[in-house]
Image (cartoon, helix red, strand yellow):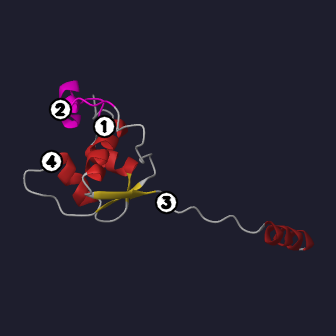
Amino acid sequence: MSGPGRPGRDDSPDRLYTLTGGRSRSGENSPFDLVTLVVAECDPAPGMQSEHAAILRMTERPTAVVEIAAELRLPVSITKILLTDLLDAGRVSARHPRREAVPDLDILEQVLVGLRNL
């Protein structure tokens, strides 16, 4: 009983090599990590690589890199290379999710005192 393997693990190395044009890294200045949100800046164009077109369709709304990789069933490293291609072409934008501001420490201390007084 063998079920589906992990995404990307069962892909032939030839297929992955072809997808990335032989590249094995997305570059030192790549803005992508697992939680980077990607948003399409245009629709897929005729003749575009199918994985690039799929990324553009799934990123009509902000989508994390890890979600894109899972949906494509590709390793994150390969997905980052494809995303870098799209970013360089101006077809997607990338940003990190907003981090909530840390509450003022005085307010936290007042809350703690209030809880202790209960």
- Label 2 sits on a secondary structure element that is helix
Name the residue tied to disc 4.
50
Q: Position of residue 56 (x, y in %)?
A: 24, 57
Q: Are marks 3 and 1 in contact (CB under 8 Å)?
A: no
Magenta residues, start to end: 7-24
Q: Quadrant of the C terminus?
A: bottom right
Mark with earlier residue (4, 2)? 2
- What is the spatial separation of the Cα atoms under label 2 and label 3, in whole angstroms? 31 Å
- Name the residue tied to disc 3: 97
Secondary structure under tag 3 reads: loop
3D distance between C-alphas at marks 4 and 2: 12 Å
**Snapshot quadrant of residue 38:** bottom left
Q: Please determine whether, in this image, residue 32 is positioned above or below residue 100.
A: above
- Of the residues shown, which amino acid type is indicated by label 2? Thr
In the orientation shown, which residue stands out farthest toward the right? Answer: 117
Residue 4 relative to residue 14: left or right: right
Per the rendering, the mark at residue 18 is: 2
Q: Are marks 4 and 2 in contact (CB under 8 Å)?
A: no
- The residue sitting at 47% across, 57% down in the picture is 96
The tag on residue 26 is none
User: Which numbered disc flags the more N-terminal residue, 2 or 1?
Assistant: 2
Closest to the observer, 68 or 30:
30
Question: At which x and y percent is residue 76?
Answer: 36, 40
> How far apart in space, not on screen, are marks 2 and 1 (Cα)?
11 Å
**Which one is earlier in the sequence, the residue at label 3 or at label 1?**
1
Q: Few, some or many C-alpha atoms within 10 Å of disc 1 (few <14, some 14-19, many ≥20)? A: many
Residue 80 in the image, given as x and y percentages of width and height: 34, 42
Residue corresponding to mark 1: 78
Disc 4/disc 1 C-alpha distance (Å): 14 Å
- 99 left or right, relative to 16: right
Between 55 and 73, which is closer to the camera in this rendering?
A: 55
